[in-house]
Image: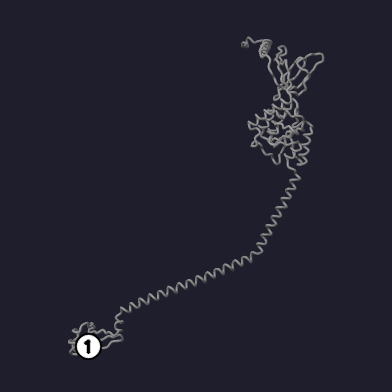
């Protein structure tokens, strides 16, 4: 198909554009399409069925027509189908629709197999990893709740939360929890709640249902939205056997909406009892400590007196030992000094001239005081002075002194 030429001066008529679009779409031929039946209409006397096919993950729908011979029995709303159809563009009305030549309803087994494959894919990406799980706040400022309008799940969560924590605040988003609009409504509500800073936890609740009813909670778009939330998410789908993928990606999976209420808020009465018990145990511990300290303080003077007395006695003993050691040391030093002095004295005495005199020798000097060392120094009648050990006396030399 060639490119259309146009300009402000030579615009194309609308019918030409419509015909061109119809020609281009007609060239697509038949294609296989998967979707969910949002509406099924049978008109009396008409051999054509009219369907509204909706994308399971996006808010997109398209009209589908088929001959009665294509369907053996009518389709239920919400059914998953795979159909072969040719796109038709009605130029007169400018609308696009699908004309189906074959429609196959997707069975439960196939749906469960698809969920299993999706589970493996998301697990490989790490969306179910334990390290991604976040702890729930102890006292949330506001609790976001996504559930059906006036549903038993909403009542169970709200009543049980307020029974445990009176005055708890909620931000409730009522959405479809099954059917063709469930995924888009839940995803939109989840994004709105996640964008509110005062919402500290989000609960997605539904009161159980069949496998087909729980299919929205295994939808890939919903699972990825939950994984991207900054706010902790609690899954509270009241299922018995089958586990939707929402349980795996949520931060906490509760078995029922009632169980979710027990997880998101503490029980005020239980916490009060715990506080009272903790207060009693703390008071008892303080009293025991005070009693122990009082007993220690009561015996402190006696222990202090004994300690001081022991220190004094030890000091006295140490002083006595020191005095004895000092006296012994001094006595030893004095005795050694006496011995040394005696030895020195003996040596001095032995070298003294007086000691020689004491042994009987005498020192003779003439009148001039000059010592007489030889006999020829003395003449007859010389007066001599003789000094002995004890005193001195004078003598006169005889005439023959020199010859003797």
Q: Between residues 34 and 142, which one lies in front from this camera angle?
A: 34
Looking at the rendered image, the quarter that the C terminus falls into is: bottom left
Q: For this view, does 237 lie left or right of residue 322?
A: right
In the current view of this chain or complex, which residue is farthest to the front? Answer: 109
Apparent side of residue 24 relative to residue 241 in the rendered image (left or right)? left
**Quadrant position of residue 21:** top right
Seen at 80% across and 17% down, the residue is: 42
Near mark 1 (Cα within 10 A), the count class, few <14, some 14-19 or many ≥20, is some
Residue at the disc numbered 1: 383
Q: Quadrant of the N terminus?
A: top right
Q: Is residue 386 visible?
A: yes
Q: Position of residue 204 (x, y in %)?
A: 73, 33
The relative height of residue 30 versus residue 252 in the rendered view (above or below) is above
In this rendering, does residue 100 appear at all? no
Q: Is residue 327 above or below residue 282?
A: below
The colour scheme used here is one colour
Residue 141 horizontal/vertical position (percent): 71, 39
The number of numbered badges drawn on the structure is 1
Comparing 161 with 341, the one in front is: 341
- Whole-percent x and y of residue 219? 70, 28
Q: Quadrant of residue 132?
A: top right
Helix, strand or loop for disc 1: strand
**Vertical relation: 24 (above or below) 56:** above
- Relative to 369, residue 68 above or below: above
Direction right: furthest residue: 44
Percent from the top left, x then y, of residue 142?
72, 37
Which quarter of the figure has residue 396?
bottom left
Q: Residue at x 70, y 32 (%)?
A: 246
């Amino acid at each position: 198909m060639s490119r259309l030429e146009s300009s402000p001066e030579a615009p194309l008529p609308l019918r030409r554009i419509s015909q061109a679009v119809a020609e281009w779409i007609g060239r697509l031929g038949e294609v296989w399409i998967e979707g969910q039946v949002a509406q099924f209409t049978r008109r009396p006397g008409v051999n054509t069925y009219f369907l509204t096919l909706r994308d399971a993950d996006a808010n997109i729908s398209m009209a589908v027509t088929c001959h009665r011979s294509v369907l053996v029995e009518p389709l239920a709303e919400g059914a998953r189908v795979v159909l072969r159809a040719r796109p038709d563009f009605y130029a007169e009305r400018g609308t696009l629709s699908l004309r189906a030549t074959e429609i196959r309803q997707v069975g439960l087994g196939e749906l469960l197999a698809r969920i299993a494959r999706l589970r493996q894919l998301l697990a490989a990406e790490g969306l179910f990893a334990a390290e991604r799980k976040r702890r729930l706040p102890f006292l949330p400022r506001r609790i976001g709740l996504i559930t059906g309008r006036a549903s038993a799940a909403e009542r169970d969560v709200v009543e049980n939360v307020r029974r445990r924590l009176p005055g708890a605040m909620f931000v409730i988003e009522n959405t479809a929890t099954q059917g063709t609009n469930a995924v888009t409504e839940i995803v939109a509500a989840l994004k709105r709640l996640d964008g509110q800073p005062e919402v500290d936890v989000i609960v997605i609740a539904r009161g159980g249902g069949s496998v087909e009813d729980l299919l929205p909670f295994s939808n890939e778009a919903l699972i990825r939205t939950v994984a991207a939330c900054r706010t902790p998410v609690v899954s509270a789908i009241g299922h018995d056997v089958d586990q939707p993928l929402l349980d795996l990606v949520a931060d906490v999976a509760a078995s029922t909406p009632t169980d979710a209420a027990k997880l998101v808020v503490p029980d005020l009465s239980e916490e009060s009892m715990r506080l009272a018990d903790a207060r009693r145990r703390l008071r008892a511990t303080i009293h025991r400590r005070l009693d122990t300290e009082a007993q220690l303080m009561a015996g402190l003077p006696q222990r202090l007196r004994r300690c001081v007395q022991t220190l004094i006695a030890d000091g006295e003993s140490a002083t006595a030992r020191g005095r004895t050691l000092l006296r012994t040391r001094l006595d030893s030093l004095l005795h050694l000094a006496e011995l040394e002095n005696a030895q020195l004295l003996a040596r001095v005495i032995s070298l003294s001239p007086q000691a020689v005199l004491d042994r009987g020798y005498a020192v003779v000097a003439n009148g001039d005081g000059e010592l007489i060392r030889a006999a020829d120094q003395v003449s007859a009648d010389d007066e001599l002075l003789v000094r002995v050990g004890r005193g001195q006396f004078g003598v006169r030399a005889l005439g023959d002194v020199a010859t003797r």
